[in-house]
Image (cartoon, rainbow, N blue to C red):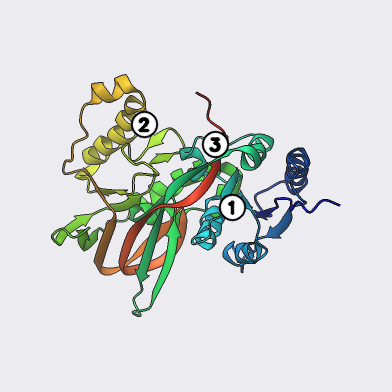
Amino acid sequence: MSDVTLRNAAVIYNPVKVDLDALRNAVNTETAAGGWSESVWFETSVDDVGQGVTAKALQLGVDLIIVAGGDGTVRAVIEAVRGHDVPVGLIPSGTGNLLARNLDITLSDMHESVRAAFTGEDRAIDLGMIRIERDDKSRDEHAFVVMAGLGLDAKMITNTDEDLKAKAGWAAYVKAIVKSLRDPDELHMRFQINDGAAKRATVHTLILGNCGSLPANILLMPEAVLDDGLFDVMMTRPGGALGWIRVWVKVAWTNGIVRRTKAGKALAGEQKNDGDLRYETGSEFTARFSRPEEIELDGDAFGKAVAFKAWIEPSKLRIRIPVTTA
């Protein structure tokens, strides 16, 4: 009788986002092919979007966490995995699939994603953490793997019609962007990057990004790298309609198309800040606002913040990616 202990995986899935039968078939195929024991399955819910069921899976001592859902489910699962030396496999199942997109994991082939989760290699990436202070002085702490945003970015998330998002996908954000652009309010903040001098700024948008690629070929933060121990800070304050056009050209054309190739980067030259669009980098960022402001983490609304402290935990997370070939 063999005393070999087989490896086992836990699958955390969002029932609204996945074809469960197809996912089960793909997982069962790979466990049988790789000699894994039968996987354990956990379903997320409105009351437990991922943290609780992931904690239960970890208590079982699983060797791999597989998450199938949208960006919110991925964020919640990763938040629970923090502090545990267990790799995470991604089965992209949402609208944006932002982390998978930035890791070049296939977005449209479930069987290939499942195969990569079981047979791929681990890549250590940075984990963003943020402690949010609310208007009542309470504080809550969260993880993020893609970005944290305030101003226009967070208002866009708040204004997005979830029913339209389910039907039209990323296109649903267009309507939300138009609505958010009509909001004249700006962010008035006092901020500090690392141990630098405290500064004041008035901006339309503030984003801290661990990675920078979005759907529709948008490269929001061209220098952002998932494993450099830093997040990129983006602040925008366009001057009128012309300023918005300049920002869009930089993000959609210069960053999204030109800078994606080595020759294009040379052609575009060094990235420069101006009055419309400013980039910084750091491993710690603190900010306090003149009034409570909407905040989003990895594409989900997180209420309003009067202040926050964000920091990077370098190479804190192991993500399973397809094996790279020389």
Q: Position of residue 37 (x, y in %)?
A: 76, 50
How many circles with numbers are drawn on the protein? Answer: 3
From the viewer's perspective, is 295 left or right of 101?
A: left
Q: Nearer the viewer, mark 3 or mark 2?
A: 3
**How far apart are the alpha carbons under marks 3 and 1?**
27 Å
Q: Using the numbered discs, state the Cα–Cα distance from disc 3 to disc 2 in whole angstroms.
A: 19 Å
Q: Which residue is mark 2?
A: 256
Q: Nearer the viewer, residue 77 or 168?
A: 77
Q: Earlier in the sequence, mark 1 or mark 2?
A: 1
Of the numbered discs 3 and 1, the one sitting upstream in the chain is: 3
Tell me: 15 left or right of 124: right
**Location of residue 81 by image quarter:** bottom right
Q: Residue at x 13, y 60 (%)?
A: 197
Q: Provide the residue designation for mark 1.
A: 163
Sequence-wise, which precedes: disc 3 or disc 2? 3
Task: Give me the C-alpha separation between circle 1 and circle 2.
Answer: 28 Å
Q: Amino acid at mark 3?
A: Ile
Residue located at (24% from left, 21% from top): 267
**Circles 1 and 2: CB atoms closer than 8 Å:** no
Secondary structure of the residue carrying numbered label 3: loop
Q: Position of residue 234 (x, y in %)?
A: 28, 47
* SS state under label 1: helix
- Identify residue for label 3: 105
Q: Secondary structure at mark 2?
A: loop
